Amino acid sequence: MQDNRLNIGIAGAGGFARFAAHAFLAVPGINITGITDIKLSAATAMADSLNSKVFKNYESLLKEESIELIYIATPPYLHYEQSKMALQAGKHVLCEKPAALRSSEAEELMALADAHQLLYTVNLMQRYNPLFAIVRNIVNQKLLGGFLHGYFENYASDESLNADHWFWDEAQSGGIFIEHSVHFFDLFEGWLGAGKVTHALQLNRPGITKPIVDRVQVTVLYKDGVVNFYHGFDQPKILDRQEMRLQFEHGEITLYEWIPVRMKLHALLSKKQLEKIGDLLVNFSIEHHYESLAESKKVRGRFSEITFDEHVTIEYGNASQKEIRYKEMLTAMITDQWSWITDRKHVRVIDGTNGVQSLKIAEAASRAAQNF
């Protein structure tokens, strides 16, 4: 492999694979060398748009010697076998989430990659979002005090998911926790450390003969607090929306969209804390709530006195930047992974352990879920 070139082969020619391919190509030296899909017409159309080569099947793609990394963007039930085949063929692997339908399979893939000194990573790109690092700094420095509670509410669209779509078939998708929630289990673990599932539930869509689980909820206990995750795939696209909040002793942070692009922070802060938060942000707006400030600027919470200088609401980010942010995250992710391929001393933002750990939480949620 040349340090200044990376040839990628893609398995799966759906809409997200096309989007990801363009994000990868924003990195100088990356080439999309080959594409395969069970639908030859889809592979051909994607290959034509990228000036790439079509391969009639996955096996022939793996035999192409010039391809160094396989990007797998197929339905989840294929991830384990296709990742294993690619690693056995001596290819680096970047796989869409989830790593597999079972965490034992993901652990096997990670061990296989290690044995062959190959890259194996699941595309949990949320940690490449600049807002991830901002929130992590606030949590780690306890700028709002200790963490207490969080939630993630995901009111997702099902307009493109007809009743026969593989998404609804747990044998193909693993179910909502495994197919979708892994993104957010990994995100919150990056902020709060390892979590443990305490209880979960899942709801069937009423009024249809074929059982379809379209709403799930799980509670995860972390070292310092608890987080509730809700995912519902039952909205028209125009109403698709997401929101997550982290509540602390001295205020809260609210993030908007499933790829967070906008943040609101409301808190009681010392001048030093406000200065540190300001250093983390660029072009933010701030509202000072002077009317709430007593002369002493002292209040009580959790049986303790809280002394503060500022009662503020800070807003940061722009919802219109969602697609741009998404592309930037994918570009940052492939750059990070490629850096490790060329220099094994490079410390990646995510590696194979993220795919395994997030899947373990998803499995635990699926096991704990009760039907209602």
Image (spheres, rainbow, N blue to C red):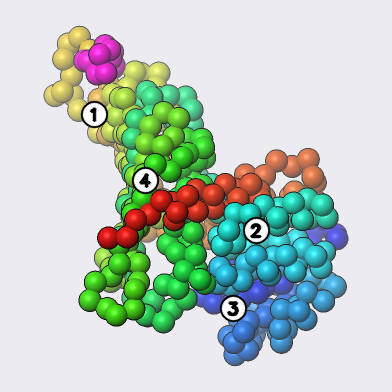
Discs 2, 3 touching: Cβ within 8 Å? no
Compared with 50, 243 (above or below) is: above
| Labels 2 and 4: the sequence-earlier one | 2
| Labels 4 and 1: the sequence-earlier one | 4
The kind of secondary structure element at disc 4 is strand
Amino acid found under the numbered disc labelled 2: Glu
Residue 245 coordinates in the image, percent (x, y): 33, 42
User: In the displayed structure, does residue 168 sit left or right of residue 45?
Assistant: left
- The quadrant of the picture occupied by the C terminus is bottom left
Dot label at residue 105: 2
Amino acid found under the numbered disc labelled 1: His
Mark 1 → mark 2, Cα distance in angstroms: 52 Å
Residue 34 coordinates in the image, percent (x, y): 72, 77
Pick the front one: 151 or 201: 201
- The quadrant of the picture occupied by the N terminus is bottom right
Mark 1 → mark 3, Cα distance in angstroms: 50 Å
| Labels 1 and 2: the sequence-earlier one | 2
Compared with 298, 29 (above or below) is: below
Residue at position x 34%, y 73% in the image = 211
Compared with 349, 369 (above or below) is: below
Mark 4 → mark 1, Cα distance in angstroms: 40 Å
Residue at position x 52%, y 72% in the image = 172
Can residue 80 be seen in this snapshot? yes
Q: Residues within 10 Å of mark 1 (few under 14, many from 20)?
A: few
Can residue 183 be seen in this snapshot? no
Dot label at residue 74: none
Dot label at residue 199: 4
Dot label at residue 288: 1
Magenta residues: mostly which secondary structure? Answer: strand
Dot label at residue 13: 3
